[in-house]
Image (tube, rainbow, N blue to C red):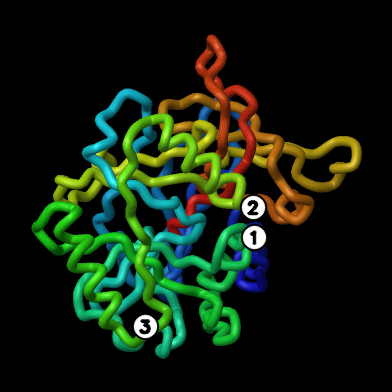
Amino acid sequence: MNDRISLRLVLSLLLLDVMRPLVVIAGGDHGVAVRSPHPGPEVADTPSVRIEGPVRVPPALALAEVYVPGIALDRYLVSEKLDGVRGYWDGQRLLTRGGHVIQAPSWFTADFPALPLDGELWMGRGTFERLSGTVRRLEPDAVAWQAVRFMVFDLPAHPGDFETRLALLRGLVQANPNPALGLVEQMKVSDHTALMEMLDQVVAAGGEGLMLHRRDAVYRAGRSADRLKVKPYLEGDARVIAHLPGRGRHVGRMGSLLVEESDGTRFQLGTGFTDAQRDAPPLIGEVVTFKFHGRTVHGKPRFASFLGVVETF
């Protein structure tokens, strides 16, 4: 939290120059892009300003599409979708989805295999905010990290299909002496009805949803139907364009976000925030995730509600 507040103060000073709407700050292994509001209908594109720091290369991760009923579920294995922070172990370092080095205590990654692992840093259901704060710290909090586990679900460098990779991964985790390393268990599911029953059970217990992994798929980077996320609602991402002032009991703090999807659709996102999030809202330029229930005739999300900031730090 202190790191975020300090960063916010620096960004506030930089954003005084409204003629430079894009500022990229990179210091050490951490960086963030911010875009200031523009008085016109569009935000002008201008060269970015970069303030020292190494070039980072995000890991080439496999990403999920959204499950649509009608597929052959016997070709997939299913697991709980953990509400954590995506992590990538490159054999030596623990990285975020955005390519930043995670400053975990040395004992946390001790004895991790010397080969790439794809997984999720996790504290348990309903702990995402605490986990995110722990993972973001430049100086690791050893006490907080004791509650974290790296729950792995794939071997990105292995050429075999998912079932082959899963069997090898299970053996690696079982033989590893570090209790911080865990395995995301996979199960078979017979049909859509059984999948929905499993989803209801997970959500009722405080879980986020399910993940489907195609059994015969090789590991490939990018978004594909090899992985499908199953949730009780639709989900989307949008970039923050502006903070809109609150009214009523939210006077003096953020009331809603003006956001823009990748196809240019703009709308206001005003529900789903805690008071603390309204006091310290997502930064302009950050990408946020929201849930919604279908779209209007104009293509805007219906009943959109904030879920969180996309963790690409």
Circle nearer the viewer, 1 or 3:
3
Proximity of marks 1 and 3: CB atoms separated by less than 8 Å: no
Going by the numbered disc 3, the residue's amino acid type is Thr
Query: Answer yes or no: do the residues labelled 1 and 2 have beta carbons within 8 Å?
Result: yes
Q: Considering only vertical position in the picture, is 25 above or below 306?
A: below
Horizontally, residue 137 falls left or right of residue 47, namely: right
Q: Please give the name of the residue rendered at 64% of the width and 60% of the height, measured from the top-left corner.
A: 13
**Of the pair 261 and 93, the residue shown nearer to us:** 93
The spot of residue 109 in percent (x, y) is 36, 83
Q: Position of residue 53 (x, y in %)?
A: 38, 72
Given contact means CB atoms under 8 Å apart, are the residues at marks 2 and 3 in contact?
no
Q: Which residue is mark 2?
A: 16
Q: Residue 43: image x %, image y %?
A: 51, 34
Question: Mark 1 and mark 3: span between their CA atoms?
Answer: 38 Å
Q: Is residue 175 left or right of residue 9?
A: left
Front-most of 92 and 218? 218
Q: Residues within 10 Å of mark 1 (few under 14, many from 20)?
A: few
Query: Mark 1 highlights which residue?
Result: 13
Which amino acid is tagged 2? Answer: Leu
- Residue 177 position, x and y percent, is 33, 87
Residue ID for mark 3: 109
Q: Residue at x 50, y 74 (%)?
A: 148
Residue at 60 percent of width and 22 percent of height: 302
Q: Residues within 10 Å of mark 2 (few under 14, many from 20)?
A: few
The C terminus sits in image quarter: bottom left
